[in-house]
Image (tube, coloured by chain):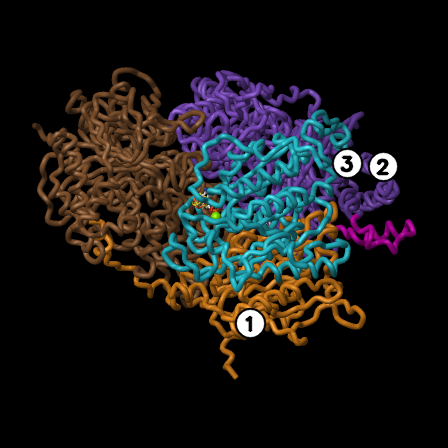
Chain colours: A orange, B brown, C purple, D cyan
């Protein structure tokens, strides 16, 4: 057993929390801190980067370098932080509006890049901080108490979108299952490459459809939420050079991601180990001060113009 | 026959048809021979087929701009000579009108041109480029390689041009020698091709040079023949650039591509991103994480960076440095043409009030200094910065002996933290500058947010904190204004007590300086030139001092409204008397500027709009 | 006892805890009773729990701003009274310091407060809101519905407030009557609840009114009690708005949500989009297709629209009209606080040079006129427009008798085409305006592009065309400047030959007018007020005329740098002598502005920064 | 048979074309004009909206209302045009960089909306107009002559992305099969809802990998490109209320979209008929002048504030 130098407490701050009482974000925050403790990365080697929204406030509550950036831009900023200093453990966090609405373009293109960071989307199906409008995961035809009319736009499928975009680790978690969520986040953090976790999050103030009770329901004797881990589902691409296996696993994961309603799978849907963007750029793990950039001799370059 | 010390050679043809390499290799040969070059290209937003042309000014002295007139014109197509008739409203009627009397037009003999009705005071020489090359190759026993070696028609055209310009053939041929590898292997063939072109034209001219470039001494070390865009890249590398993001856009692409090509060897991270929003935000992330970061774009991309500018400034990320390669606007505008129309926008490039630095270098030397030192300022004052450059600066080549990369001040990363157990990233200090830590450093954990925040970087809506933080952030601009010497902000060229003061910025510098010399020489006008090089913080006192004692002031800008004029008035209250503007996407030529200045001086017109009605 | 004609009532509590409906329903009751109301709310960027408060100014005459002082304060939590201590740096210390001497503090009796050490010159009355309501319900035999009807504690608080303010109870109770449906059914219960609160407080005050609002006559038609944000929406509907896009953002959301709620009945298309880039581009598409289109946002969203602004202007799309609800910047800044810091950015909101209109209404009446007529201008001059509004305008309520929606000029769609067989969308005309067609119309097929284009809308890089097109587009701004009367651009309030001229714009209007009245009354200072209402095209002559003859000038702005001051100087060369600025996110209160103006008048400080060190 | 009032010629303009000789865009343009002729919609009832790129110039060559807009923004602009005047036939066209790079966010979110227009992406795998950088469809590891190094970012799968985003008509065409492309575009135009067609396009100047020759190759006796129509593949959701069928058809289409290399399917991958966004807003077909907006009586609304 590893010696536990850090406990979840070490990743907490004393900052006054402004989330609503009962918000699912609290549980995600705890799971995130538990996951960091489990991975045992020192707080000062962690950077948590967020967008704007209720969820965007998370970094303030984590004892680690915290960048609470712009709405929809957590992913590019996290990419910049990681590429600048690959020795850091970087997490991007944000809401579903942040990630799949205004951030959709960055979401898609980050999938192509596969920089080594973890991206957690707090998916409450609404724009929380702007008072409950439907977000891109709000299912067409549904209407929460904050909405004037039922949604007339279709919802996206975040997991299928992620796989179509090239993500190398694609998972779904649930806020109110602290242990398995912490464990899932831990896996995501350990994954080398961009690890994406869509986290079903309750918003007691605006989302009165998919509530703690709804998620917790038993249907026909089965809990609505179940862990893929408990089935014989295998998310892993075992031979990344085997294109057939890659495609088969992608298709399997996408098919699985469409299961929704009475039975909702949680856990890792897809995972493949391939070189990261940094690997391909041969950046190594060097922080800025250890790059050979501070005293360049450019005479050869200059002379090439003679 | 008298020697010519200032000749303009021109090469026109369809885009993608090889005029770039032809012109650049010929100019390089002349530069190595000892001539000083100033050259620029005009081209369409197109990949293959539209009209493009290079103008190359060749002199024994440095020139800072192009002349209107051409002495020798080499044309690879009909449009270069006769214009484009395929448009409902043809956009030009060819370059013949630019030729000096007695000028030489060399065109591809394979074109069947009808030149009746065209100017009769110039020489037209059809040269069968392909045939001449084929003959050279056949003679060398390599006739079968014609297709592979067809690029050597450049050398035929070069030789032909040398003849027309009166450049010593041997001097030109010399340029092929001394390479290695494939280049060396082809040296003799190229020399022969050049000779074929040379002889052909000399024969057509009855072995009489029409022009004769003044002989020059071949320098020991050849000068650099360099574009602004490469000078920027080298200065940035010298400054310790660690992280560059970009999304392809004209005319910034070449800087990015050059950096990308050298990324691995320079330990530089270059990321081609999905759009400019990503470009700036990624660069802000890297800046916070401790790398010097930058992104390069032009107007449309910069417009997409507005939100990111406020983010960088409010969170005091210490960078990024943005290189804004201005082109014809607004919107997509004239993507491959030059304009100085983004000054105002660069001063307030986003909502709310925030501090950032804006500089505007005017020539290669300025570019190097500014591109380098702005990284120091970004770190020192912990803010983003914008360097205003333009399409002209991206594409013009000029000879320069060296860039002075080794004479720059040391890298200054500003104030860095020492762990004290209670680190505050946004600590209130007397200077307004809070020592920085970077992620990964022990004891330096910080938070930051785009919301208004307290000293620790956490959100607060406290009115008291708000006022202090605004004072802190905006105060840094005043600090920068105090610390950066005036000598980096403005330059006054020419006599202090001139009759007229010309005010300008950016790449009009070369043209203005050259033209003022002519004005003094030919018209006896004692003028000076106030170059404003730092736009934010604006050098209020320095500019007011110069303009306050100016007898007469004339503004020169390559935009519609005279934006610097507005800025000067906003900051100093001084209204510059006359405005000369040009906004057709083509830089002022020497003649245009000269004529416009004369017209301004002889009248009282408040605004003179200069137009270049050629291609 | 003398009557009070100007009382301020305040209600504080946690966000999401019902203070909005409590304050708004109480104010509405008073408005219906005949009092004139000016009220505003301050709240955090938060959903539930953070401190928020309403200030309601009640008078027998119209007031245009809030007073610093409160006569009666109702508190639903501890923080309202004692401040927030949960932050490392507490952001405020409660509102007790704002109370007038002898003021009445009513607080929820369920709170166990320790008020030792607090002011002793005010009355503290703990009122058991829940208990009182429960008793009323039990008496009415509906005790079991307590939870469902708990919102009625608002009426208890209202009754308690009426007692403290000296409002006739019957007058207040009257406001519950006359509704329909559920409202009517609850009228009597509400009246009883009010009575319970009223009696409780009267008892605590020994049946002695401390304040006594001057009696007023109940008007035949109750006045509107309205926020700027709804006035904007109604004016836009009146203007024929057909297409509205939005992405949620504070403080613009309420306008969008209101329009959305009325979309089906008003045949209006409202689209909640994925971001502000989409919002503006979709609106440009709709404008080209012939609908009057608009989008409403605040700073961060507007920053993302920079590219779209140039697109709309260059392609002469005739709209959209952007409503920019300014909030505390830069970046995310202070999302729920007010600032006037986006003026400069709105004048050049993107790269390159293009024409657009910027107006800045100052009060409800201006809002209606400007929000309406700017659609006419957008169509007439075929350009986009920006209406500068702010968080204060979004959230303040004011009584007004009617909006004058039926006294507006007719809808003017500008010049429309007639088929002539060779339609040119961008035809050169004397006025610079080319008649428009809309997709779907026969004979009107057009092209447009964000590249520079010819009269038909096809790409051209012709220098000649470029110059003509720039002149055409920029010329429209001059046309607008000529055609729009000065009376729509500036207002001068007060005597022509005043001792001092106050210059301002936007929502400071109400405060300035009220304060100048006080200055005249109390200090005998004859001041006038220049309100600048049109920012682009800037009314150069009109402003220069007024300021040219002003004896002394003072600028009032709610931002850091005094942006209008810069604009005035840029455009007229006139430097406004003194700048009073406030940039803490809270609007000037009457007292703050009065004190600052006095200080300015008694000294020569160039810049006075006013701060509100309260919540 | 319908009387042919309009022929392809009626949709052509005399504007000087600046595409490179041999560019695949010419063929797409022809197919588009043939498709319009086949649908027989009068030119003045058509609007073609494009982004920026070589492909973005297409509207100038089509005799119809033409809006050549901003890079990456064809989709929102087309949406605005269509919603403003639903009686128009609207097409959005643009490059792969335009659509999947800078436009990815709009691509995804348009899928949710299902406004009735056709979106054609000219997919040449490169940024043509900016000189051949790899676009989001450039396959990782490949390198064209315009690229300094092989692509280190993964390519997206446009069809899978479209399906994950909610598109109701998803297809792939090939520029140089004029008849079947015209027919495919015709189907797309007729589809009610957002119809997306990824069109494989040759760029002889920058893409020297996926050339006319490569696409035209026979492998093991089979042509590389084949039509789904010629197989027993059924893209159609027959009962849109049957969620199981919907999911099955989506998964089938995504699986099919991953077939690439020796055998590349063309044609319609997925199609479902559901109400459009306009339908749900009950906009009808009314052009601006026929909306009840020009003379509103607002007294009731105003009085509600009393
Ligand atoms: C450019 C920009 N547009 C809009 C906003 C306003 N805004 C703040 S949070 C938010 C949405 C939050 O929703 P989500 O991302 O789902 O996060 P949640 O609050 O639900 O956690 C929006 C639209 C903004 N801050 N910036
Ligand atoms: C905001 C913005 N960024 C960058 C550009 C420059 N630009 C013009 S076309 C283009 C890419 C074109 O590639 P693609 O969309 O694939 O179209 P293609 O030329 O291949 O048809 C880019 C990046 C621009 N016009 N606007
Ligand atoms: S609004 Fe919803 S998501 Fe936001 S803090 Fe409250 S409960 Fe959580
Ligand atoms: S660069 Fe490629 S895509 Fe662009 S016009 Fe030329 S061949 Fe076509
Ligand atoms: Mg959300
Ligand atoms: Mg492309």
Residue B411 drawn at (x, y percent): 28, 55
Residue range highlighted in magenta: C125-151
Is C440 on the left or on the right of A209, as rendered? left
Q: Are marks 2 and 1 in contact (CB under 8 Å)?
A: no
Quarter of the displayed picture in which ligand 4 can be seen: top left
* Image quarter hosting the N terminus of chain C: top right
Residue C329 pos. (x, y %): 51, 43
- Residue B281 image position (x, y, % from top left): 46, 52
Other-residue count near label 1 (Cα within 10 Å), few / some / many at <14 / 14–19 / ≥20: many
Report if the CB atoms under discs 2 and 3 are less than 8 Å apart: no
Indicate the quadrant where residue D269 lies: bottom right
Q: Secondary structure at mark 3?
A: helix
**Residue appearing at x 44%, y 44% in the figure:** D22
Q: Which residue is mark 3?
A: C29
Q: Which residue is mark 2?
A: C177
Near-viewer residue (C317 or A51): C317
* B288 w.r.t. D282: above or below: below
Which chain hosts label 3?
A: C
Nearest the eye: C255 or B281: B281
- Mark 3, mark 1: which one is toward the viewer? 1
Sequence order check: which comes first, mark 2 or mark 3? 3
Q: In the figure, is residue D75 to the left or right of C27?
A: left
Q: Which mark is residue A237?
A: 1
């Amino acid at each position: 057993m590893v010696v536990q130098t850090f406990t979840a407490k070490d990743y907490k701050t004393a900052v006054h929390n402004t989330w609503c009482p009962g918000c699912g974000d609290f549980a995600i925050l705890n799971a995130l801190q538990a996951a960091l403790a489990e991975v045992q990365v020192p707080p000062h080697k962690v950077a948590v980067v967020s967008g704007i929204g209720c969820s965007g406030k998370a970094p303030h509550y984590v004892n680690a370098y915290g960048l609470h950036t712009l709405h929809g831009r957590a992913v590019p900023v996290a990419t910049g932080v990681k590429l600048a200093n690959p020795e850091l453990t970087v997490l991007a966090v944000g809401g579903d509006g942040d990630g799949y609405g205004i951030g959709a373009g960055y979401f898609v293109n980050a999938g192509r890049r596969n920089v080594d960071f973890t991206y957690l989307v707090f998916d409450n199906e609404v724009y929380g901080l702007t008072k409950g409008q439907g977000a891109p995961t709000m299912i067409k035809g549904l209407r929460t108490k904050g909405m004037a009319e039922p949604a007339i736009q279709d919802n996206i499928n975040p997991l299928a979108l992620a796989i179509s975009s090239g993500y190398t680790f694609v998972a779904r978690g649930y806020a109110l299952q602290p242990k398995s969520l912490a464990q899932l986040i831990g896996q995501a953090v350990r994954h080398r490459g961009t690890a994406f976790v869509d986290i079903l999050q309750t918003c007691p103030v605006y989302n009165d459809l998919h509530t703690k009770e709804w998620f917790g329901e038993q249907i026909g004797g089965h809990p609505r939420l179940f862990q893929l881990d408990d089935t014989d589902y295998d998310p892993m691409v075992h031979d990344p050079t085997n294109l057939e296996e890659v495609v088969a696993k992608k298709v399997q994961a996408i098919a699985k991601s469409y299961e929704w309603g009475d039975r909702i799978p949680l856990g890792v849907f897809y995972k493949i180990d391939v070189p990261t963007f940094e690997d391909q750029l041969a950046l190594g793990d060097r922080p800025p001060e250890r790059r050979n950039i501070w005293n360049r001799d450019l005479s050869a370059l200059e002379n090439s113009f003679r | 026959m008298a020697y010519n010390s200032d000749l303009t050679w021109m090469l026109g043809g369809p885009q993608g048809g090889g005029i770039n390499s032809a012109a650049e290799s010929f100019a390089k040969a002349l530069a190595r021979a000892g001539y000083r070059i100033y050259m620029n290209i005009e081209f369409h937003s197109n990949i293959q087929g539209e009209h493009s042309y290079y103008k190359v000014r060749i002199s024994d002295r440095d020139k800072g701009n192009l002349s209107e007139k051409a002495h020798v014109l080499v044309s690879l197509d009909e449009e270069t000579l006769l214009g484009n008739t395929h448009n409902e409203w043809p956009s030009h009627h060819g370059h013949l009108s630019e030729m000096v009397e007695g000028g030489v037009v060399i065109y591809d003999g394979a074109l069947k041109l009808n030149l009746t009705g065209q100017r009769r005071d110039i020489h037209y020489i059809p040269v069968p480029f392909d045939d001449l090359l084929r003959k050279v190759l056949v003679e060398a026993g390599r006739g079968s390689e014609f297709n592979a070696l067809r690029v050597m028609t450049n050398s035929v055209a070069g030789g032909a041009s040398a003849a027309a310009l009166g450049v010593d053939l041997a001097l030109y041929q010399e340029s092929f020698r001394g390479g290695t590898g494939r280049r060396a292997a082809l040296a003799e063939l190229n020399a022969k091709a050049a000779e074929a072109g040379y002889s052909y034209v000399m024969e057509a001219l009855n072995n009489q040079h029409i022009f004769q470039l003044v002989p020059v001494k071949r320098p020991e070390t050849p000068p650099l023949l360099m574009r602004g865009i490469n000078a920027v890249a080298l200065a940035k590398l010298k400054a310790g650039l660690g992280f560059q993001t970009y999304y392809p856009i004209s005319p910034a692409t070449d800087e990015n591509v050059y950096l990308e090509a050298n990324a691995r060897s320079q330990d530089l991270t270059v990321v081609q991103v999905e759009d400019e929003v990503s470009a700036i935000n990624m660069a802000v992330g890297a800046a916070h994480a401790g790398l010097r970061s930058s992104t390069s774009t032009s107007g449309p991309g910069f417009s997409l960076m507005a939100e990111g500018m406020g983010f960088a400034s409010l969170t005091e990320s210490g960078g990024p440095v943005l290189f804004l390669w201005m082109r014809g606007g607004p919107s997509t505008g004239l993507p491959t043409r030059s304009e100085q129309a983004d000054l105002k926008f660069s001063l307030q490039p986003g909502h709310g009030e925030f501090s950032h630095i804006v500089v505007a270098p005017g020539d290669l030397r300025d570019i190097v200094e500014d591109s380098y030192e702005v990284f120091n300022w970004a770190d020192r004052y912990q803010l983003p910065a914008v360097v205003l450059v333009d399409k002209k600066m991206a594409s013009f080549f000029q000879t320069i002996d060296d860039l002075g990369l080794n004479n720059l001040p040391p890298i200054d990363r500003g104030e860095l933290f020492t762990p004290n157990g209670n680190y505050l990233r946004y600590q209130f200090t007397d200077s307004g500058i809070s020592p920085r830590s970077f992620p990964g450093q022990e004891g330096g954990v910080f938070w930051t947010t785009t919301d208004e925040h307290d000293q620790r970087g956490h959100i607060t809506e406290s009115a008291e904190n708000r006022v202090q933080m605004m004072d802190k952030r905006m105060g840094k601009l005043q600090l920068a204004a105090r610390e950066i010497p005036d000598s980096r902000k403005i330059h006054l060229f020419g006599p202090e007590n001139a009759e007229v003061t010309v005010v300008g910025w950016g790449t009009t510098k070369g043209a203005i300086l050259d033209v003022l010399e002519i004005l003094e020489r030919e018209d006896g006008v004692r003028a000076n030139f106030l170059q404003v090089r730092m736009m934010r913080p604006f050098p209020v006192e320095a500019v007011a001092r110069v303009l306050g004692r100016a007898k007469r002031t004339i503004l020169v800008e390559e935009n519609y409204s005279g934006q610097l004029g507005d800025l000067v008035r906003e900051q100093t209250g001084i209204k510059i008397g006359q405005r000369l503007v040009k906004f057709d996407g083509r830089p002022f030529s020497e003649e245009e500027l000269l004529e416009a200045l004369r017209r301004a001086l002889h009248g009282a017109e408040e605004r003179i709009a200069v137009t270049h009605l050629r291609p």
